[in-house]
Image: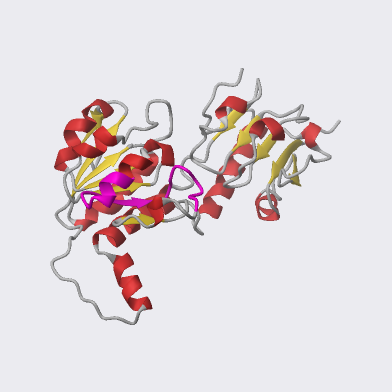
């Protein structure tokens, strides 16, 4: 008697093609917009990227569900809705390169006043600026030293900067940052850094981490780069600091998000905003497909899934 196939749902045909050569797998393409006729058989469900669907709605009728695979590194908003007995997995490792590239890009664009030159080009106006800031010789603080934080530090290192890293707990560092400071040291570290890159996960401990008091510890002219989650930063406090000209900010994430058209962040001097595009590059898809394939192979072999962020129970 043939073994029952592992039924896996994927959001599009590209993912299905990446699994086509695996024996014992039955792949269904499901964008999760409506219930699927094979829903009761699905054991591994891969959610669409940047979805705003709620897991509680999707999981209805998925009686055999064992694993939900996200395509994002962030997972906080999904945790409360994970059904009993289901393992939630994030996409750790998938977005490291893309997010790190954007963090460096936002930093360079802000420091070198690229938005101003883009405006000048649109007006066909030659407006040279002299004696502007440079990334070289800057003191860069990476707040959140997980996989993406390390990838960010590695990309900053060749730019002749001094690097400092902060994580939830102090620990030994690596070949890029020899020592990692604990988050409790953040207030004392901030005054000594020109660029602060934020890449912490959103949690009760990090929500509002960069409030008025924390931002007030940053030195005049410093740049805050947020590629984490919008609520990590107090938006009103940041607007006040940037509007005064004391700080600058480069944000791939905001609170609220999407940012309303009339929000002051759009027009606050010294603020550069991108619409949460950190992981959205061509580098993402091959890594995401490889992760899904590893998950399927693990389930076929009876091994635990990788990147689990909860305890199924």
Q: Quadrant of the C terminus?
A: top right
Magenta span has 109?
no
Where on the picture, by quarter, is residue 60?
Answer: top right
- Residue 107 is left or right of residue 263, and the answer is left
Q: Residue at x 42, y 35 (%)?
A: 201
Q: Using the rendered image of the protein, determine whether residue 215 is visible from the camera's viewpoint.
A: yes
Q: How many marks?
A: 0
- Location of residue 310 in the rendering, given as x and y in whole percent from the top left corner: 54, 25
- Near-viewer residue (229 or 200): 229
Image location of residue 179, percent across then percent down: 21, 34
Furthest toward the right, the residue is 1
Residue 37 figure quarter: top right
Task: Please tell me which residue is depicted at 36% across the width and 38% down the height of the picture.
Answer: 234
Observer able to see residue 229: no
**Magenta span has 244?**
yes
In the image, what residue occupies the spot 29% across and 81% down? Answer: 125
Image height check: is 266 above or below 163? below
Task: Please say if 151 is above or below 178.
Answer: below
Apparent side of residue 97 relative to residue 182 in the rendered image (left or right): right
Image-based side of 189 in relation to 46, left or right: left
Percent position of residue 207, x then y: 40, 31
Pick the front one: 51 or 127: 127
**Quarter in which the N terminus is drawn:** top right
Q: Is residue 49 above or below residue 4?
A: below
Q: Is residue 180 left or right of residue 288?
A: left
Where does the image place residue 218, in percent across and percent down from the top left?
A: 20, 41
Give the image quarter of residue 272.
bottom left
Instruction: Report the span colored magenta.
Output: 239-260
Q: Is residue 175 or residue 48 the one in the foreground?
A: 48
Give the colouring mode of the picture.
secondary structure
């Amino acid at each position: 008697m043939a073994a029952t196939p592992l039924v896996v749902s994927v959001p599009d045909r590209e993912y299905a093609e990446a699994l086509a050569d695996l024996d014992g797998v039955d792949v269904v393409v499901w964008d999760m917009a409506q219930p699927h006729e094979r829903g009761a058989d699905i054991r591994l469900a891969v959610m669409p990227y940047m979805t705003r669907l709620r897991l509680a709605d999707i999981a209805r009728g998925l009686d055999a569900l064992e694993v939900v695979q996200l395509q994002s590194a962030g997972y906080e908003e999904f945790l409360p809705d994970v059904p009993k007995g289901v393992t939630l997995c994030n996409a750790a490792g998938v977005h490291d390169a893309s997010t790190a590239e954007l963090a460096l890009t936002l930093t360079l664009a802000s420091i070198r006043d690229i938005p101003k030159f883009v405006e000048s080009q649109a007006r066909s106006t030659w407006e040279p600026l002299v004696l502007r800031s440079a990334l070289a010789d800057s003191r860069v603080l990476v707040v959140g030293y997980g996989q993406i934080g390390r990838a960010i530090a590695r990309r900053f290192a060749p730019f002749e900067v001094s690097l400092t890293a902060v994580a939830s707990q102090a620990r030994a560092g690596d070949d890029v940052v020899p020592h990692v400071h604990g988050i409790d040291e953040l207030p004392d570290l901030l005054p000594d850094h020109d660029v602060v890159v934020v890449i912490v996960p959103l949690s009760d401990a990090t929500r509002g981490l960069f409030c008025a008091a924390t931002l007030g510890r940053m030195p005049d002219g410093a740049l805050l780069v947020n590629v984490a989650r919008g609520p990590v930063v107090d938006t009103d406090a940041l607007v006040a600091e940037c509007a005064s000209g004391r700080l600058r900010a480069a944000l791939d994430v905001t609170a609220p998000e999407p940012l309303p058209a009339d929000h002051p962040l759009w027009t606050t001097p010294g603020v550069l905003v991108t619409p949460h595009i950190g992981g959205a590059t061509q580098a993402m898809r091959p890594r995401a497909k490889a992760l899904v394939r590893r998950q399927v192979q693990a389930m076929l072999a009876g091994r635990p899934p990788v990147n689990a962020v909860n305890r199924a129970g």
